[in-house]
Amino acid sequence: MPEGLPWLYDTALGWVISGPLSKDDDHSVVEVSTVCALGTTTAWMNSEPLIRQSKHEEELAFERYFQDTHSRLADGRFVVRLPFRIEPSLLGGSMNMALKPFLTLEKKMCNNSELASEYKKFLKEYEEMGNMSKIEDTVATPGTYYYIPHHVVYKDSSSITKLRVVFDASMKITTDYSLDDILMTGPVVQQELFDIVLRFRYYLYVVTADVAKMYRQVLVHENDRHFQRILWRDAPNKPLQHYVLNTVTYWTVPASFLATRVLQELALGSSTKYPKASLSILQDFYMDDYLSGADSMEDIKTLYQEVSKILGNGGMHLRKWCSNAEELLSQRLLP
């Protein structure tokens, strides 16, 4: 084999390409080792985002619904509508059914002071950040509201918080429907993780980050918030309080689409002013995780600055930045 060409190896995981790769722009050489299926396209190296060939009718309807109903506030944050696929009047009474798991949770907290402290801290922050608001007038016609049960899960791998409050909109109520049952899920608008990772390995300099509390940066229209009610009190001897969740609620079926579609909308709105950064947002995000790069120090600095600015204009702030670019780290350009 001529010197300088990569080698192909047939392994149990697929074909492995390994060897030096010359970069035309700066004549540097990097080592590449990539697993791929024989005959697959190299579209991941293309500068254009991948285009899905077909979409389900509901996915197209969801996209049209998003375009017709979303809005932005003066501070740039997005407001979205819940995408009902079935008339919400089919929802029956839900408060008493949501009360049962809450009382179980409350009993558990009484026997676990650490759990109680962390749970209260989480929901206190939720309220202080405007993600939920107390409501005084709770009287409403069944079918115009929904109470979402909530419980706790632990995530030991998290470096931010190990406790997460889970809002479970899959609870079926008196009419045998749940909130999730009557909402559209929405299409996947981001590229496959496999494509993102392969492209990420191709760059000389790379950066990673994630969006801080991404779902909680997208507001739900006030007319839809009563379908996101919860019950809460921080002590059993206090009156039970009613709240509405003001932002997109993770673990509801349309949450992923709504939040990631807002990321895409931010990118599309800046495509003329910041074309490279816009393209990077479109093709280098997997959920709230950002993996991208460039082949020069100047380009990686510009990418970091422009992507941060685009997303910051919509209330989406990137955190936990990491990079193999020593200059970015040594100059403390990454927050």
Image (cartoon, rainbow, N blue to C red):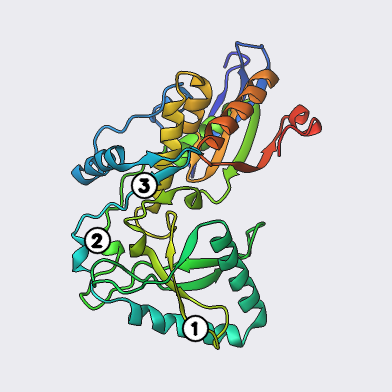
Q: CA distance from mark 1 to mark 3?
A: 32 Å
The residue lying at 56 percent from left, 67 percent from top is 123
Q: Which residue was labeled with disc 2?
A: 182
Q: Nearer the viewer, residue 152 or 249?
A: 249
The residue lying at 59 percent from left, 62 percent from top is 125
Q: Residue 285 at what x, y percent from top left?
A: 50, 38
Q: Residue 304 at what x, y percent from top left?
A: 63, 29
- Amino acid beneath label 2: Ile
In terms of sequence position, does the residue under pointer 2 or pointer 1 come before the other? Answer: 2
In terms of sequence position, does the residue under pointer 2 or pointer 3 come before the other? Answer: 3
- Amino acid beneath label 3: Val
Q: CA distance from mark 2 to mark 3?
A: 17 Å
Q: CA distance from mark 2 to mark 1?
A: 31 Å
Query: Would residue 320 appear left or right of 246 to someone viewing this image?
Result: right
**Other-residue count near label 1 (Cα within 10 Å), few / some / many at <14 / 14–19 / ≥20:** few
Q: Residue 93 at what x, y percent from top left?
A: 27, 76
In front: mark 2 or mark 3?
3
Q: Which residue was labeled with disc 1?
A: 239
Quadrant occupied by the C terminus: top right
Write down the quadrant of residue 228 in the picture.
bottom left
Q: Which residue was labeled with disc 3?
A: 80
Q: What numbered label is drawn on residue 78?
A: none
Write down the quadrant of residue 4 in the picture.
top right
Write down the quadrant of residue 140 in the picture.
bottom left
The residue lying at 58 percent from left, 31 percent from top is 309
Considering only vertical position in the picture, is 103 above or below 73?
Answer: below
**Other-residue count near label 2 (Cα within 10 Å), few / some / many at <14 / 14–19 / ≥20:** some
Q: Is residue 69 visible in this depiction of the protein?
A: yes
